[in-house]
Image (cartoon, helix red, strand yellow):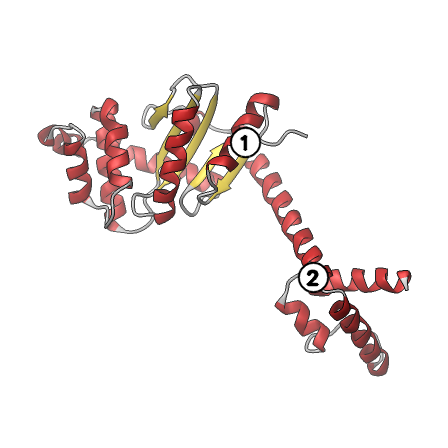
Amino acid sequence: MAALGNVALAVGAGLVGAGATALLALSGALPVATAVAPPERAAMERLVHDYVVQNPEILIEAQKALQKRQADRDAAEAREKLASKPETLENSRLQAVLGNPDGDVTLVEFFDYNCGYCRRALGDVNALIEKDPKLKVVLKEFPILGRGSAEAAQVSAAVNLIAPDKYKAFHDRLLGAQGQADLASATKAAIEAGVEAAALQEALKKPEVRATIEEAYGLANQFGVESTPVFIIGDAILPGAVGEQAIRARIDAMRKCGRTACS
């Protein structure tokens, strides 16, 4: 029976790892082996079906194995992409910097002011900055959610250009606010943060504003960033609002072994 279990597990892992596809395969909707005669094929399908029904935990095991394989593949792809990072990813004259500009670890975030997950991640990023005086956070304007996002990104770039000391107050106000981020709401947040309205209007005309966003788009394209938020730290690309603890673990690993995952 041990041998039968091994065969069923091997077949089951190949057939059932993808959930619904597996069920179709086991039910006979998908071919198991075209070279097998129909009677033998039916017996094989019944054998695998019965084993999986009696041992459903192999579905979970197979799914976990697939998830780990995909995570390992994603991590390897990220390391390959980040093997030769351009200077502008972590050190650009156009970028907004929070935390310690001379920090020993740099966390880069691609964000959009109309991204709900970016709003959720705001508290995580601020908590990391507050608890870690040696952390440098670099923000990349990546407006992908329409015209309002593009307008807000332009105001953000202009604020950083003329009043970097007021940028964090502006950023927290706008990203932490409810409703649509656009030219009006971003301008209001900037003025409330202490930026002069006339100076802001003049800054919006400067070529550096457009260059800031174009640079971020170029970097996003280079590293395969297609959504927000996306965090880049060390040799890892982390899509989504992964949470304070997940990022903290990567920061700690960077300080310990120079990679985001110590072996």
Furthest-top residue in this view: 102
Residue under the image location 79 percent in, 69 percent down: 51
Residue displayed at 21% across by 36% down: 155
Q: Evaluate whether residue 150 shows in this view.
A: yes
- Residue 156 lies in what quarter of the image? top left
Q: Quadrant of the C terminus?
A: top right
Q: Nearer the viewer, residue 211 or 239?
A: 239
Taking 61 as reference, is 141 left or right? left
> Of callouts 1 and 2, which one flags the residue occurring earlier in the amino acid sequence?
2
Q: Is residue 215 left or right of residue 249?
A: left
Q: Quadrant of the N terminus?
A: bottom right
Q: Residue 245 appears at what percent x and percent y?
A: 50, 35
For the point 31% across and 27% down, which residue is it? 94
Q: Residue 199 location in percent, x, y?
A: 12, 28
Q: Amino acid at mark 1?
A: Arg
Please, is residue 7 above or below residue 164 in the view?
below
- How many residues crowd mark 1 within 10 Å: few (<14), some (14–19), many (20+)? many
Q: Which mark is residue 160?
A: none
Identify the amino acid type marked 2. Answer: Leu
- Where is residue 60 drawn, in percent x and y? 67, 58
Q: Position of residue 53 (x, y in %)?
A: 74, 70
The span from disc 1 to disc 2 (Cα, nearest Å) is 30 Å
